[in-house]
């Protein structure tokens, strides 16, 4: 197993369990403990994990992991989620795509759609959809967050307030088992809340690892979401609550 595969495996295990042990990972992957310790040092240096005695844990819930690591994390699930989401969006629709690597995957999945109008505060989404000649792209102005190409703040929220779109496709950094959608940046959260208000229907796109993460700022509740596209919900109680809220879950 090469270093990229090991790092992906360690990330996935940490996101599922909250922590990883070097000796257990070495036995699981069939490599030396020293190799795993080196991997953990690299992942901790990148902000993906925090080192503890004998292994590592997920970072505290007050700062996000790096954009490159988020893009690589659970990549295949994000592609499946994006493809299912694209099936929910017809041609000739208007929609909003917010900041996030899963919403960027949705933008890629919309490459064959025709006559879309897409409003976004994500420069990466805008660049992806610029390749679709029948798609009109509107970029909501705001303060540029260089780490991930996001536009946030008062200007972005004011720009979105001018629209009423058919769909809001939103992501979240974490999902609490109570159904709360969470993120790290209050300025980004304000924009996401404005997006939900400006849409006739809201689609949440998030893979199952978001249930293992924590973040300090509440965006909304799954009760405010019309459709939740994911690769897994770890709580039967939450599935039942989604049914009570008329939040449809699509498992991919």
Image: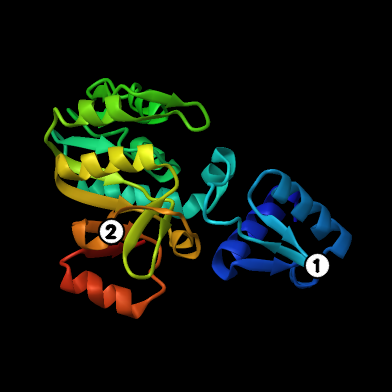
Q: Is residue 236 above or below residue 137?
A: below
Q: Which quadrant is home to the C terminus?
A: bottom left
- Which residue has dot 1 on it? 30
Callout 2: helix, strand or loop?
A: strand
Q: Nearer the viewer, residue 96 or 229?
A: 96
Q: Which quadrant is home to the N terminus?
A: bottom right
Q: Position of residue 44 (x, y in %)?
A: 71, 50
Instruction: Tell me which residue sits at (40%, 67%) in the image.
Output: 232
Q: Nearer the viewer, residue 215 or 135?
A: 215
Q: Residues within 10 Å of mark 1 (few under 14, many from 20)?
A: few
Q: Nearer the viewer, residue 12 or 91?
A: 12
Distance of mark 1 from mark 2, alpha carbons? 37 Å
Res. 51 visible in picture:
yes
Q: Is residue 120 left or right of residue 76?
A: left
Instruction: Tell me which residue sits at (54%, 47%) in the image.
Output: 63
Whichever of callouts 1 and 2 sits on the residue coming sooner in the sequence is: 1
- Which residue has dot 2 on it? 228
């Amino acid at each position: 197993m090469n270093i990229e595969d090991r790092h992906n495996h360690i990330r996935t295990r940490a996101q599922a369990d909250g922590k990883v042990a070097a000796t257990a990972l070495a036995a699981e992957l069939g490599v030396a403990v020293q190799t795993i310790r080196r991997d953990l040092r690299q992942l901790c240096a990148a902000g993906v994990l925090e080192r503890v005695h004998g292994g590592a844990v997920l970072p505290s819930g007050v700062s996000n992991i790096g954009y490159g690591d988020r893009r690589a994390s659970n990549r295949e699930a994000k592609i499946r989620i994006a493809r299912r989401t694209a099936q929910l969006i017809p041609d000739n629709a208007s929609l909003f795509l917010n900041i996030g690597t899963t919403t960027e995957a949705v933008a890629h999945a919309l490459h064959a759609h025709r006559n879309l109008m897409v409003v976004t505060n994500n420069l990466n989404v805008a660049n992806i959809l610029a390749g679709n000649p029948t798609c009109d792209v509107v970029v909501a102005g705001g303060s540029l967050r260089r780490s991930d190409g996001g536009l946030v703040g008062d200007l972005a929220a004011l720009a979105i307030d001018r629209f009423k779109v058919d769909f809001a496709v939103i992501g979240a950094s974490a999902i609490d088992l109570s159904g709360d959608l969470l993120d790290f940046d209050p300025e980004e959260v304000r924009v996401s809340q404005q997006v939900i208000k400006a849409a006739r229907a809201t689609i949440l796109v998030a893979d199952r690892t978001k249930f293992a993460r924590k973040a300090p700022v509440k965006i909304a509740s799954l009760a405010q979401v019309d459709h939740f596209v994911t690769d897994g919900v770890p709580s039967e109680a939450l599935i039942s609550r989604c049914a009570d809220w008329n939040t449809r879950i699509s498992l991919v």
